Image (cartoon, rainbow, N blue to C red):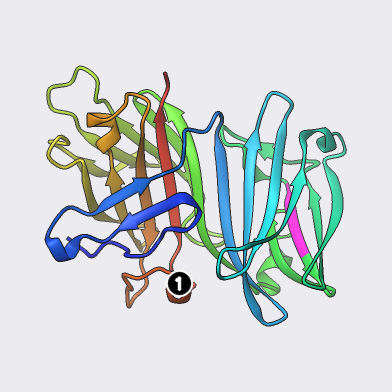
């Protein structure tokens, strides 16, 4: 079994490397059950030659879609948070400015033609942009794709999503910047089944299957996506032995040519991206 990433504890996610004791690798989620689908995207950028994290949370409630943009320093101390509330989406386009540590950052967004699927994160027809001192420090979306490719000075680190279902859990997966967006489906039936199994499909094609899940409720495997090796880690202990409403946790991590087991802040590379999926069973 490949070594599990030994340091990935930011934002309520703790991944423990137990390879030294020859035990199964463990993914431990300490995030309480959310009341709605939530998508969190984490990026790395530089402000005044200092590293910062940009965290964008997308959510949806009865009023509509909303998002927040949070800026953190490398020690994960929150420096500023900008809320774009559903009531503001009547305009679906706007800007805000925020000042911290004598730095003023401008947030601009346009969701006028945004298209949404089952996720609260838009899939097309939008952009969100952060500007500091006249220079772009982050730009996401597809309406200004050419500008993003020509001016990219940020790094996409991680996407975390909470999904709900009973036997099937569906989301979108994009493992490379401006790469193909895939339909990712996790299938697992653990209720009233003598020998539970787990299956992962990508665009309808089976890319991973785990049988005898009671004995393999934690583990890892490697798949290929568009020729890119992707490590898949799973922990379905809560589904099998915990609360019926507990979440299973899945991590899909792209692999660099020279892989690193430590994916802490200092060890991240442009070739490494993580997709974390928390799969909650509907009550």
Q: Position of residue 245 (x, y in %)?
A: 37, 25
Give the residue displayed 42% in from the left and 22% down from the top: 282
- Evaluate whether residue 180 shows in this view: no
Question: Residue reaching furthest bottom?
Answer: 49
Residue 210 in picture, x, y percent from top left: 19, 41
Is disc 1 surrounded by few (<14), some (14 to 19) or many (20+) residues within 10 Å? some
Q: Which residues are magenta?
A: 126-130
Q: Residue at x 82, y 73 (%)?
A: 102
Near-viewer residue (112 or 102): 102
Point out the image quarter for the N terminus.
bottom left
Left or right, 180 with respect to 68, comes to left
Residue at 62% across, 37% down: 120
Report whether 193 appears left or right of 68: left
Q: Position of residue 194 (x, y in %)?
A: 12, 22
Q: Report which residue position mark 1 lands on.
A: 268
Give SS at disc 1. loop
* Quadrant location, the C terminus: top left
State whether residue 84 appears in this view. yes
Predominant secondary structure, magenta span: strand
């Amino acid at each position: 079994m490949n070594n599990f990433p030994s340091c990935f504890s930011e934002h309520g996610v703790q991944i423990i490397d137990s390879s030294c004791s020859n035990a199964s690798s463990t993914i431990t989620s300490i995030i309480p059950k959310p009341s709605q689908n939530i998508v969190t995207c984490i990026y790395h950028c530089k402000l005044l030659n200092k590293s910062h994290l940009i965290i964008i949370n997308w959510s949806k409630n009865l009023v509509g879609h909303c998002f927040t943009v949070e800026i953190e320093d490398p020690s994960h101390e929150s420096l500023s948070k900008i809320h774009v509330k559903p009531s503001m989406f009547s305009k679906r386009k706007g800007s805000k400015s925020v000042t911290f540590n004598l730095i003023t950052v401008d947030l601009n967004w346009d969701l006028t033609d945004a298209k949404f699927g089952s996720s609260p994160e838009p899939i097309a027809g939008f952009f969100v942009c952060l500007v500091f001192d006249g220079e772009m420090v982050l730009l996401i979306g597809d309406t200004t794709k050419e500008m993003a490719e020509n001016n990219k000075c940020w790094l996409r680190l991680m996407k975390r999503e909470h999904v709900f279902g009973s036997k099937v859990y569906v989301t979108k997966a994009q493992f490379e910047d401006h790469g193909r967006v895939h339909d990712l489906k996790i299938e697992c039936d653990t209720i009233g089944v003598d020998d539970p199994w787990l299956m992962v499909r990508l665009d309808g094609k089976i890319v991973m299957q785990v049988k005898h899940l009671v004995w393999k409720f934690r583990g890892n495997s490697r798949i290929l996506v568009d020729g890119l090796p992707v490590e898949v880690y799973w922990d379905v202990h809560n589904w099998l032995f915990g609360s019926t409403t507990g979440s299973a946790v899945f991590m899909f991590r792209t692999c660099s040519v020279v892989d690193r087991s430590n994916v802490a802040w200092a060890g991240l590379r442009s070739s490494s991206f993580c997709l974390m999926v928390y799969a909650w069973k509907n009550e």
